[in-house]
Image: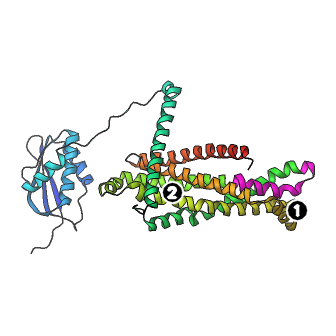
């Protein structure tokens, strides 16, 4: 058996405006593939009207050859060059014929709307209604997937859930620690300015504790996670959409909602309340730093904390964290699943995930606060 030969090609000028592409060697897996980008400048320089592919010196071949020939076919079709593959083996010609029988689908480019169209309130309303309908449909699919999980008929893997818990939990400690301490210090400074007018600086501890437990701790943690984890979910799923991995999962009969979305949603629902408690503790610590600079002793600060803290305030923040976690996960996963194909589409999906999540958080936070006010919680 002869030793394998590296695949090679030679482009030569023919009579008239024709050119001959001679292929030689073994075009099979295990060999260094030939890059069509090296052949493109030679074809541009010759500018032939007809290209003849000669395979007389061709050895063993498999999909490596077919991928190269498909690139040649696409280039010739785009440049209006007649491609002649009659000298190739019959099996190679048949495979190329099957691969090129149906031209690739090209979506028509929609004209960019003008300034007046963008400012049209009816157009904005239609877009908002469409987004709401897509969100409700996605939420319904997620509910069905969670129901299948509870019934034990889901394709959700525990290993994926554990991985995403680590990704959205311990990996976020650094940024959550920094933002929480600074938010606690800012709350203390803002409160001290007003309380000092009444000689009530001691109540800075009450302000920081209630503010962190009910509002700032959970909200700032959710904002950070929306920009960090929500965008990561959108980028991951958008890249899988670009690589047609989601199509492959669907073809195998596996639900992408159960396999990809459910573990991400559950991981964020578990980790965000824990990160909220962690952020509350560090926010109170940040307030203690400011209180110490105002002459309030640590014992006085802790005494005021004991008077201000209650299980109601803690449960309000934790209930918000569960709602925020679901909203962030839905915004990120929906943007990724519905992403287009291409690097630009993945970037747009990540941006859309962050913007949508922030809007969800603001609206949900306002609604929950109004509800708790009416319930006197």
Residue beneath disc 1: 296
Residue in the foreground of this view, choosing between 150 and 307 = 150
Identify the residue at the far right of this view.
199
Residue beneath disc 2: 265
Q: Quadrant of the N terminus?
A: bottom left
Q: Earlier in the sequence, mark 2 or mark 1?
A: 2
Q: Is residue 183 visible?
A: no
Residue drawn where x is 15% and y is 68% of the image: 5
Instruction: Look at the image and say whether residue 249 sits in the magenta stretch.
Output: no
Q: Main secondary structure of the magenta part?
A: helix
Disc 1 crowd, CA 10 A, few/some/many (<14, 14-19, 20+): some
Q: Is residue 144 visible?
A: yes
Disc 2 crowd, CA 10 A, few/some/many (<14, 14-19, 20+): many
Residue in the foreground of this view, choosing between 313 and 27 = 313
Circle 2 SS class: helix
Based on the displayed image, in which of its 4 quarters is residue 221 positioned? bottom right
Residue drawn where x is 49% and y is 58% of the image: 264
| Place of residue 41 in the rendered image (x, y in percent of width and height, measured from the top left) | 25, 48
> From mark 2 to mark 1, how far is it between C-alphas?
43 Å
Q: Which residues are magenta?
A: 196-216
Residue in the foreground of this view, choosing between 355 and 347 = 355
| Place of residue 359 in the rendered image (x, y in percent of width and height, measured from the top left) | 58, 43
- Answer with left or right where residue 4 lies relative to residue 225: left
């Amino acid at each position: 058996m002869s030793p394998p030969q590296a695949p090679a090609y030679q482009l030569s000028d023919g009579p008239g405006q024709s050119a001959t592409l001679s292929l030689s060697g073994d075009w099979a897996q295990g060999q260094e593939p030939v890059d069509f980008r090296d052949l493109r400048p030679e074809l541009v320089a010759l500018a032939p009207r007809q290209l003849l592919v000669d395979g007389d010196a061709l050895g063993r071949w498999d999909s490596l050859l077919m991928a190269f020939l498909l690139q040649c076919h696409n280039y010739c079709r785009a440049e209006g060059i007649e491609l002649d593959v009659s000298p190739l083996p019959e099996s190679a010609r048949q495979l190329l014929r099957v691969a090129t029988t149906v031209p690739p689908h090209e979506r028509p480019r929609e004209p960019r709307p003008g300034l007046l169209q963008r400012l049209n309130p009816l157009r904005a309303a239609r877009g908002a209604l469409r987004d709401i309908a897509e969100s409700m449909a996605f939420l319904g699919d997620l509910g069905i997937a969670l129901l299948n999980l509870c019934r034990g008929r889901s394709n959700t893997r525990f290993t994926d859930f554990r991985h995403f818990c680590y990704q959205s939990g311990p990996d976020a400690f650094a940024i959550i620690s920094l933002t929480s301490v600074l938010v606690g210090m800012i709350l203390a400074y803002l409160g001290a300015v007003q309380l000092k007018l009444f000689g009530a600086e001691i109540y800075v501890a009450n302000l920081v504790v209630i503010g962190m437990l009910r509002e700032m701790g959970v909200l700032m943690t959710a904002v950070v996670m929306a920009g960090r984890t929500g965008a990561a979910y959108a980028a991951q799923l958008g890249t899988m959409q670009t690589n047609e991995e989601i199509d492959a999962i669907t073809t195998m009969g596996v639900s992408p909602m159960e396999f990809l979305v459910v573990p991400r949603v559950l991981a964020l629902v578990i980790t965000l309340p824990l990160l909220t408690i962690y952020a509350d503790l560090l926010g109170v610590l940040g307030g203690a730093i400011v209180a110490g600079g105002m002459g309030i002793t640590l014992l006085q600060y802790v005494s005021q904390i004991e008077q201000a803290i209650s299980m109601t305030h803690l449960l309000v923040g934790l209930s918000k964290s569960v709602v925020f976690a679901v909203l962030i996960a839905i915004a990120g996963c929906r943007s990724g699943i519905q992403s287009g194909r291409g690097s630009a589409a993945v970037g747009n999906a990540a941006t859309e995930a962050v913007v949508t999540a922030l809007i969800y958080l603001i609206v949900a936070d306002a609604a929950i606060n109004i509800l708790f006010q009416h319930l006197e919680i």
